Image: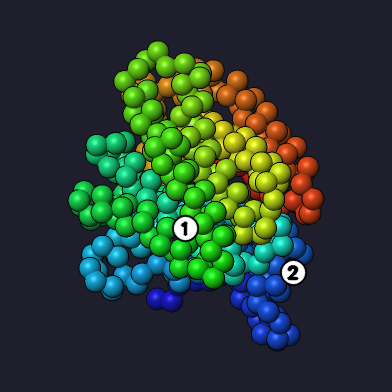
Amino acid sequence: MARSISHGECVLIIAFHRMSTHRVAPSRDLRHFLGRMCFSDQLAAYHGLIEQGLDKHLPASTTRPARMHEAMRYAIEGGGKRLRPMLLLATAELFGADGDSALPAAVAIECVHTYSLVHDDLPCMDNDDLRRGRATTHKAFDEATALLTGDALLTHAFALLATAYAAQPALAHSLIQELAATAGSQHLIGGQMEDLLAEKNSNATTDDLEFIHLNKTAAMIETSLVLGGLVGGADETHCATLRTVGRHLGLTFQIIDDILDATADTETLGKTAGKDAAIDKTTYVKLHGIDKAQQIAAQHTQSAIDSLQSLSGDTTFLVALTNAMTKRAN
């Protein structure tokens, strides 16, 4: 039976039809239409563009070894909010870049994010069976394949940046340097290590928790914004502002994650609900309670918006996306 067309796909079809009718540059024209859309339509259009980019910039599932590449696509094509590549694309466009030039970087950040999820779900880590509403990669394939799939997604991200931006060596260097530092032992991986240690420490403090979330979660969101800024030619001052936005938005995102784990159900979340309380994990909800955690998330959200609005250009979409993070259901 034929698959139904989603609202987001309809938006893209209409946009690309208009592009072909008027014979103008697709990326520039799409940016024009994005600027005239309401938030939900912009969200759907970005999401569709990201899905196209993932399909274009990942090896085909039939590439040898086929099992490896099938697993890579299974992991990354399983849906999700696509928050990080969306932030990257919107920020790049804020600074004047088009979607074509920013898309490889957007795919690279999603590859690194997905690698971290594949490894995080492994039995030696969080030992989870569900991710994005379906079996985790090690359950759909096997543990060894999942381990190698994560490795392959991580390394593919840097190969993609090196090749896609080869004609701009200074930009390629900056993008690779930024993403490598964020994915390394002092940020993403370090935050994961501290998170594992905190599971065995019932006396973890607010400072311990903030270190985990600033590095395991917020660092990648911060880097998504910075990579977009770099593609768009943002200077150091603008990149510093983007880092501030990313830190606040990242903390908001994680606090809401903690709240949802305590209040939502597994079907809505698309992953196992209630795991934090079951293992007595230190979270914002455990340390502060749900009401206070919501207040802290609201404070970080406002700080992110204040910093965004200090930038020149139209930040309407980014502000709306930041607000939407506090109201999400999964």
Say whether residue 7 is visible.
no
> In the rendered structure, which amino acid carries the disc numbered 1?
Ala
In which quarter of the view is residue 275 placed? top left
In the rendered image, residue 34, in percent from the top left (x then y), is placed at 70, 65
Q: Secondary structure at mark 1?
A: helix
Q: Which image quarter holds the N terminus?
A: bottom left
Choose mark 1 or mark 2, whichever is in front.
Answer: 1
Q: Secondary structure at mark 2?
A: helix
With respect to residue 68, does 299 lie above or below? Answer: above
In the image: residue 206, left or right of residue 23: left
Q: Residue at x 54, y 54 (%)?
A: 174
Other residues around mark 2 within 10 Å, as few (<14) / some (14–19) / many (≥20)? few
Give the alpha-carbon distance from disc 1 to disc 2, as whole Å.
25 Å
With respect to residue 304, does 7 lie above or below? Answer: below
Q: Earlier along the polypeptide chain: callout 1 or callout 2?
A: 2
Instruction: Read off the residue under disc 1.
Output: 108
Q: Which mark is residue 198?
A: none
Q: Disc count in the image?
A: 2
Instruction: Read off the residue under disc 2.
Output: 32
Q: Residue at x 32, y 52 (%)?
A: 150
Say whether residue 280 is visible.
yes
Instruction: Identify the colour scheme used.
Output: rainbow
> In the rendered structure, which amino acid carries the disc numbered 2?
His
In the current view of this chain or complex, which residue is farthest to the front?
Answer: 170
Q: Residue at x 53, y 38 (%)?
A: 218
Q: Which residue is at the front of the view, 99 or 49?
A: 99
In the image: residue 311, left or right of residue 185: right
Q: Residue at x 48, y 34 (%)?
A: 215
In the rendered image, residue 285, in percent from the top left (x then y), is placed at 50, 23
In the rendered image, residue 62, in percent from the top left (x then y), is placed at 28, 73
In the rendered image, residue 196, in percent from the top left (x then y), is placed at 34, 29
In the current view of this chain or complex, which residue is farthest to the top?
Answer: 203
